[in-house]
Amino acid sequence: MLTISPIPAFSDNYIWHLAQDGEHWVVDPGDAAPVIKALGDAALNGILITHHHLDHTGGIAELVKRYQCPVYGPESVDGVTHPLKDGDQFRLLGAPVRVMAVPGHTLDHLALLMEEPGAEATPHLFCGDTLFAGGCGRLFEGSPAQMYDSLRRLSDLPPETQVYCAHEYTRANLRFAEAAEPGNAVLQNRISQVDNLRAGDQPSLPSTIGEELATNPFLRCHIPAVARRAASHGAADNCDEVEVFATLRKWKDNF
Ligand SMILES: [Zn+2]
């Protein structure tokens, strides 16, 4: 059976650890030490990388030296042995993985969609710093239009898709979401659920695409109430969804 568990790193990163039948992979190891500790006597079979930022890649060299494992990720990242690009497919722990280019946070950003075999399959999405629970990544390299397009691609995934993002930012994101859409009752429920989880020091992740569609303002730029809030923060009346998105992103940067 596949298990996916978070290895906390730095102040708020999660390195996702996939394990099945004694085989171990990690996603975005920004630091090697917590991975080595979590593995104990087990060996690491491989590394997956979503984008080039150091808090996602800083552990690669030490882990490869120790475990001689392959590294799958964008060509731009030092140490990648299996470069990936949009549309690529490969198998991981017996399951097919689909590679999606999701530029915006960085230009090299990839999301990895793992589909477990079997009729009851729930897809697992490793989306790095593109889609967060209740929010999205900052635009360091891409344009608002690129990021919005990337988020739209992720929104089109099945609603039951489990979303494994790389940071525990959910509470702060939901505080912004509440400002962006004060009348959203589903969002209010989510805020209490996440507050309870975090009060017990539990991760707020994974979330699902369905939850994000219902509560994440960056996936709700087409909703009139969200567009009106964007208009009160500088977006033109009746502007397009990209301008609503760009306005929300700028507002959140200073929130
Ligand atoms: Zn990043």
Image (cartoon, helix red, strand yellow):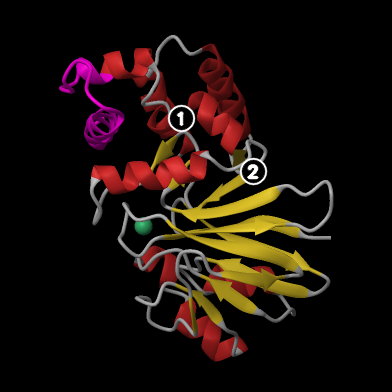
Name the residue that disc number 2 marks: 161
- The residue drawn where x is 53% and y is 40% is 156
Extreme top residue here? 183
Name the residue that disc number 1 marks: 216
Residue 43 placed where, x, y %? 70, 81
- Quarter of the view holding residue 97: bottom right
Q: Quadrant of ligand 1?
A: bottom left
- The residue drawn where x is 39% and y is 61% is 109
Query: Looking at the picture, which amino acid does disc 1 mark?
Result: Asn
Residue 12 placed where, x, y %? 46, 50
Q: Which mark is residue 78?
A: none
Residue 98 placed where, x, y %? 58, 62
Q: Earlier in the sequence, mark 2 or mark 1?
A: 2
Q: Secondary structure at mark 1?
A: loop
Q: State whether residue 203 appears in this view.
A: no
Magenta-highlighted residues = 230-255
Residue 208 placed where, x, y %? 61, 38
Disc 1: residue Cβ within 8 A of ligand 1's nearest atom:
no
